[in-house]
Image (cartoon, grey):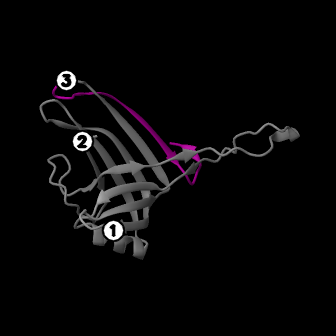
Amino acid sequence: MDLIVLQLPGITGDSTSKVAPKSIELTSVSHGVTMPMSDTSPGGSSAKTPTGVSRHSDVTLSRIYDSSSPDLHVACAKGNIYPKATIRFYANDDVGNTAEVYNVELENVLISSVQLSGNAGGKPTEQIALNFTKITWTYTKRSTGSPMTAKGKAVAGFDIGKNKAV
């Protein structure tokens, strides 16, 4: 991806991008979903079966420290809950046009961790973990030419509290 940003209400980032000004720029995003297996299946069989309850990891964001970093630390320390956070992934075409190709929308978001790291000679970086109760993934298929026109969307979501797709 050419640009990944986080948009979080009330926290202004340093992005100067035309498509996402004042957003919080990211260098990477990670999130996992697992479906655990039970030790036994109904009827006493030794075959393992899915438990039926998925587990979602926190969404982990990596970034270079900037002016939004102090606010992110305080939000974590205070336990602020945000109604929504959006992570947007953008790609550039051959002539520099930028278009969103993927986004992840989180609801009832808690900044569960902020970790600062750095060393001499480099810029400080941080890892931010976001906990949430609902997630929606949206992929926008784009043409390969210039400009990258939308060719359709794929959308899926999951409500963790209800343990069901939405």
User: N-terminal of the two: label 3 or label 1?
Assistant: 1
The residue located at (16%, 26%) in the rendering is: 146
* Residue pointed to by mark 3: 145
Identify the disc placed on residue 2. Answer: 2
- Given contact means CB atoms under 8 Å apart, are the residues at marks 2 and 3 in contact? no
Task: Work out whether mark 1 precedes mark 2 in sequence or the reverse, and give the earlier one.
Answer: 2
Is 124 on the left-hand or right-hand side of 110? left
Residue 128 position within the rendered picture, expressed as x and y whole percent measured from the top left: 39, 61
Choose the circle earlier in sequence order: 2 or 3: 2
Dot 3: few (<14), some (14–19), or many (≥20) neighbours within 10 Å? few
Residue found at the very far right of the displayed protein: 44
Residue in view at x 67 percent, y 44 percent: 52
Query: Picture coordinates of residue 86 (x, y %)?
Result: 34, 51
Question: Which amino acid, mark 2?
Answer: Asp
Residues drawn in magenta: 146-166
Q: Which residue is mark 1?
A: 72
